[in-house]
């Protein structure tokens, strides 16, 4: 959780209090002790209000279980990423990721283990991605990654390979963790997030079909 709200409210209250004291000093020629007594209370109040703001902002942008970005944040930030890509002549890769056999794992090992699995996968997705990438939980066992600066599908292969390799590291003898990934590139394959996700979802589904055929 970031501290922007606490920092902002602290300096806001400090500024208002400074103006308040300056007013009384100009008017009376001195500042009474009573003016200082309330200062600690104002500081504590400002930090509390800032914390509530930071918490509300965190919950509006982040997934409560995994701590990565949520669907609401992605839908809002895509327009900014798209505008930046247009200005620079760059593309955006959209990766749609679905956990293989998650329902079976959940049913067999329980929901608590399923939640732990989602947390571990989220961590590995972030580890596999660049700092400029947006990693988010789309819902259930589905994740997406927005990777700005990518113009061709071939450029996503390295990222996908890192994801598969990193997920192998957290697999156990009891649980094999793997995902199916579909990709779409803006602007060559779609102009809106919905269009890109639809294409990526179809590719991901086709990959699942091919994997089942091989088993």
Image (tube, rainbow, N blue to C red):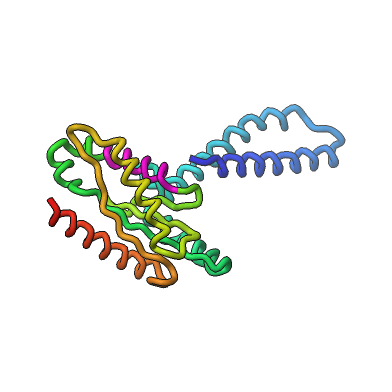
User: In terms of secondary structure, what is the magenta stretch mainly?
Assistant: helix
- Foreground pick, 141 / 97: 97
Q: Residue placed at 35% from the left, 43% from the top?
A: 122
Image coords of residue 118 (percent x, y): 29, 42
Would you place residue 88 above or below residue 4 in this image?
A: below
Image coords of residue 211 (percent x, y): 18, 54
Would you place residue 157 above or below residue 88 in this image?
A: above
* Residue 75: quarter of image: bottom left
Q: Which residues are magenta?
A: 117-129
Residue 65 seen in the figure: no
Q: Residue placed at 31% from the left, 67% from the top?
A: 199
Left or right of 101: which side holds 22?
A: right
Q: Residue placed at 34% from the left, 41% from the top?
A: 166
Q: Residue placed at 74% from the left, 39% from the top?
A: 18
- Foreground pick, 2 / 9: 2
Left or right of 132: which side holds 29?
A: right
- Foreground pick, 146 / 163: 163
Would you place residue 204 above or below residue 57 in this image?
A: below
Left or right of 197: which side holds 110?
A: left
Image coords of residue 34 (percent x, y): 72, 29
* Residue 155: quarter of image: bottom left
Residue 44 seen in the figure: yes
Which residue, as the protein is rendered here, is positioned at the far right?
A: 29
* Residue 39: quarter of image: top right
Tell me, yes or no, whether the highlighted magenta stretch contains residue 152.
no
Tell me, yes or no, whether the highlighted magenta stretch contains residue 122.
yes
Image coords of residue 176 (percent x, y): 21, 39
């Amino acid at each position: 959780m970031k501290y922007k709200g606490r920092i902002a409210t602290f300096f806001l209250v400090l500024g208002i209090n400074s103006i308040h004291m300056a007013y009384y000093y100009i008017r009376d020629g001195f500042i009474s002790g009573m003016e200082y007594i309330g200062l600690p209370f104002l500081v504590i109040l400002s930090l509390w209000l800032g914390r509530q703001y930071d918490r509300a902002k965190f919950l509006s942008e982040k997934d409560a279980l995994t701590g990565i970005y949520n669907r609401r944040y992605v839908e809002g930030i895509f327009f900014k990423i798209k505008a930046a890509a247009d200005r620079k002549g760059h593309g955006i890769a959209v990766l749609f990721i679905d956990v293989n056999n998650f329902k079976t794992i959940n049913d067999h090992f329980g929901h608590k283990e399923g939640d732990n699995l989602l947390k571990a996968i989220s961590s590995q997705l972030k580890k596999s991605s660049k700092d400029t990438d947006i990693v988010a939980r789309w819902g259930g066992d589905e994740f997406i990654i927005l990777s700005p600066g990518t113009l061709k599908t071939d450029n996503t292969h390295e990222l996908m390979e890192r994801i598969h390799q990193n997920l192998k590291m957290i697999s156990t003898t009891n649980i094999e963790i793997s995902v199916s990934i579909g990709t779409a590139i803006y602007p060559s394959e779609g102009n809106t997030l919905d269009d890109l996700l639809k294409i990526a979802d179809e590719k991901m589904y086709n990959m699942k079909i091919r994997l089942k055929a091989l088993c």
